[in-house]
Image: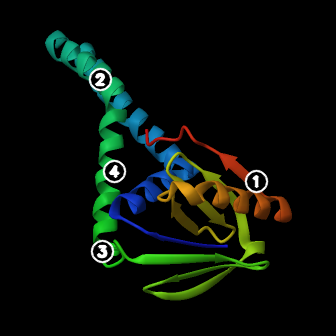
Amino acid sequence: MTFTFTLTENDLLQSQLFIASKTARIKRQRVKTWLVYSIAILLIGLMFYQSGNIVMTYYCLIFGIIFLCFFPLYQKSYYKKHYQRFIADTYKNRFGKTTTINFTEQYIETIDITGESKINLQEVENITETSNYFYVKMKTGGHLVIPKQKPGNIEQLRQEFKSICGKLSVHFIDDLTWRWK
């Protein structure tokens, strides 16, 4: 089966956000940053309380609670902008270029402007389907991003991926409700 598509800047952004949301190290880092800053603000408020400065104590308490509640929203936006800049710098020449993927018995063959590559099917760790993309995760850590652009071919592509997963005894992950948080 052969599948042809083009990647946009948003496709690559969604890919980076998806990978970040599934990476344990990044999840821990985000929670740690949130808690460390929140606790630091509240500790500063405690120091003001001990020194008798009630106005600054209330200020730090209120700011700490607001920070605790709204920092995850800021952090979500920050990471998104960070990945947007990274993609704009790194992949600017790949946007809108045609990519062709061919599935064989032993390989996933990709052809794009950078050249041709063969991915050994034995290196596939899992395949995840979201509402707009398929992500093929490799054991080496890389991902293959396939947008769901052509509605007519999506069911055929899904069946091909499920067939590959069945042959290789790897997981086909149905994550249709995924969104960046």
Query: Which residue is identified by label 3?
Result: 92
Q: Disc 3 to disc 4, how far (Cα)?
A: 17 Å
Q: What amino acid type should be assigned to the residue bearing mark 3? A: Lys
Q: Disc 2 to disc 4, how far (Cα)?
A: 24 Å
| Mark 1 element type | strand
Q: In the rendered image of this protein, does residue 151 appear above or below residue 89?
A: above
Quadrant of the rendering where the C terminus is positioned: top left
Name the residue located 31 percent from the left edge and 28 percent from the top edge.
Answer: 70
Contact between labelled residues 2 and 1, with CB atoms less than 8 Å apart:
no
> Percent from the top left, x then y, of residue 127?
67, 58
Name the foreground residue: 70 vs 103: 103
Sequence-first disc among 4 and 1: 4
Name the residue located 61 percent from the left edge and 67 percent from the top edge.
Answer: 141
Does residue 180 appear anywhere in the picture? yes
Sequence-first disc among 1 and 3: 3
Query: Which residue is identified by label 1?
Result: 171
Q: Disc 1 to disc 3, how far (Cα)?
A: 32 Å
Contact between labelled residues 4 and 3, with CB atoms less than 8 Å apart:
no
Query: Which residue is identified by label 4?
Result: 80
Local crowd size for mark 2, using a 10 Å CA cut-off: few (<14), some (14–19), many (≥20): many
Q: Is residue 25 left or right of residue 75?
A: right
Name the foreground residue: 159 vs 56: 159
Q: Disc 2 to disc 3, how far (Cα)?
A: 40 Å
Name the residue located 54 percent from the left edge and 52 percent from the top edge.
Answer: 25
Sequence-first disc among 1 and 2: 2
Q: What amino acid type should be assigned to the residue bearing mark 1? A: His
Q: Disc 1 to disc 2, how far (Cα)?
A: 42 Å
Query: Which residue is identified by label 2?
Result: 64
Picture quadrant where residue 155 is located: bottom right
| Mark 4 element type | helix
